[in-house]
Image (cartoon, grey):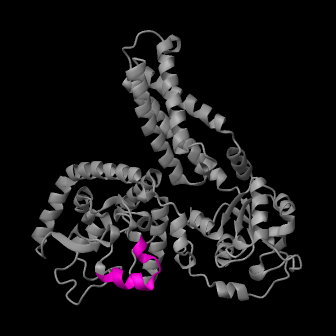
Amino acid sequence: MSTNTLLSIDLATAASLPPSRATPAAVRQKAPASGKTLIGGCLLHLPRGAWMLMDLALVCIGTLLGDKLFVWWSAGSILTDYNQWLANVVVGMAVVLAGSIVGLYEQTTLWVRSRIIARCLLTVTLAMLGSWLVLNLLMYSTLSRRAAASGFVFYLITASGLRLLGHTAVREVKRGLLILGQGPLTGTIIRSIRRGAVSGYRLVGIAVGDPQADRGVSSCDIPIVGDIANIEDLCHRFDVAEVVVAEEASRNSHHQRAALACLRMGCRVTDETTFFESTYGEVPVSHISPNWFISADLKGQLQEHATAKRIFDVVVSVVGLVVAAPIMMLVALVLKIQGRGSALYSQTRVGQGGRPFTLYKFRTMNGDAEAAGSTWAAPNDPRVTPVGRFLRVSRLDELPQLWNILKGDMSLVGPRPERPEFVGPLSILIPFFNERHLIKPGLTGWAQINYAYGGSIADARRKLQLDLYYVKHMAIELDLIILLRTLGTFFRGSR
């Protein structure tokens, strides 16, 4: 999932480009598939049962190795011990069942590295709980905890490693993409794919509803490959795997019937906005209406999801405060010795529902940093002290926000809370800016890991697009992906 594509593409310019009579790349003879492409194609079509058998074998190998290496007091041979083998099967089946629950065996898992790691971690966590319940409460088995732990660790390393290797081959597979009609986002999608900013797709062209349309050429040198009356033939001829229906076309009955025909042929069919969301990981705020929120089925409004998220926040914040207490005391001591104001800095921010709350951070700027009024922070901001610059790069300045999370003002993952002085003007200039307050703000979030530190209206708009994607797709798996990538950012020292 790429989120580094420039979104400031001028669609009017794209539409005004003169038609080219050169043979479009999409209709030239395709080059022979590489070895990686063939392997990737095989992996994508590998049945779920094969992946399940592999996981079952990996878990059993891991428990056998653990029993051999760490359970030196066990009597007899593990190979002839019926109870041990039965326990191994239970652990293995727990992994397979947990993997099925979290979507580990879905084809889409292999397309994204972070998704592979997150789903493997969730699988192991659920499997450990499930196998413990079955073995200790129902079967009274004596499988060594060391052997079981070895099995889970071995599985986590090997299963995720093998899938990550498979990912390198799968990413070489190019799925045929056909666009029905033309809409406001068509130019962005076309240009991004052609420039290689969106991996995994081979652009076929555009299918139109006018049989008299000039076939073979269109704006941006993208071919009009045919009309929608022959949609089945087009999908077969160009090996189409995915179809994007343009906004205007989605309201036309002929295009709707063509889209249904593509669905019956096994193609994935989405509209422009949905494709944009799933491909770029953000929502195009300039091309949505209030109806988008009505049809999004926002998960954050479900009480069970909010309860589970709150429990997770409380547990992590309590553990985080205990673990980080010595570091926080050391940072406070250094800032106090520096003698430029109090160590702790409080600031009013806007939380869920637009309600203000007090956010706490370690002071990183001079005491008179905002004597001239509130301004956005900037790269290499002269107001930041040397110690403050280190705290920002290492993100240690945000440790006091664990208290905000414990109080319930914030969540671990969510949109970053903005200041009231900025929320007012931005809500006027940027459509749906206030809708980012539908959920609690977070210590980290989808926008923070995918976009650099923002200090302008354009940056605020781009970060809103990322925040709205999280508002719609928030889930435990996405939270785990964000936390893992946040840790990566922390170790790289990025800001």
Residue 479 in view, yes or no? yes
Left or right of residue 261, residue 248 in this image = left
Q: Tell me which corner region of the image, top left, top right, bottom left or bottom right, holds residue 225.
A: bottom right
Residue drawn at the location 53% of the way across and 48% of the way down: 116
Q: Residue 359 appears at what percent x and percent y?
A: 24, 68
Q: Kindly give the residue lying farthest to the right in the view shown.
A: 212
Q: Residue 382 appears at what percent x and percent y?
A: 27, 83
Residue drawn at the location 50% of the way across and 37% of the way down: 98
Figure check: 293 above or below 6: above
Q: Quadrant of the N terminus?
A: bottom right
Dominant SS type (magenta): helix
Residue drawn at the location 40% of the way across and 27% of the way down: 133
Q: Which residues are magenta?
A: 421-435
Q: How many marks?
A: 0
Figure check: 176 above or below 435: above
Q: Residue 374 appears at what percent x and percent y?
A: 27, 85
Q: Quadrant of the C terminus?
A: bottom left
Q: Residue 222 appears at what percent x and percent y?
A: 77, 76
Residue 28 in view, yes or no? no
Figure check: 209 above or below 53: below
The foreground one among 383 and 463 is 463
Figure check: 267 above or below 360: above
Q: Is residue 307 magenta?
A: no
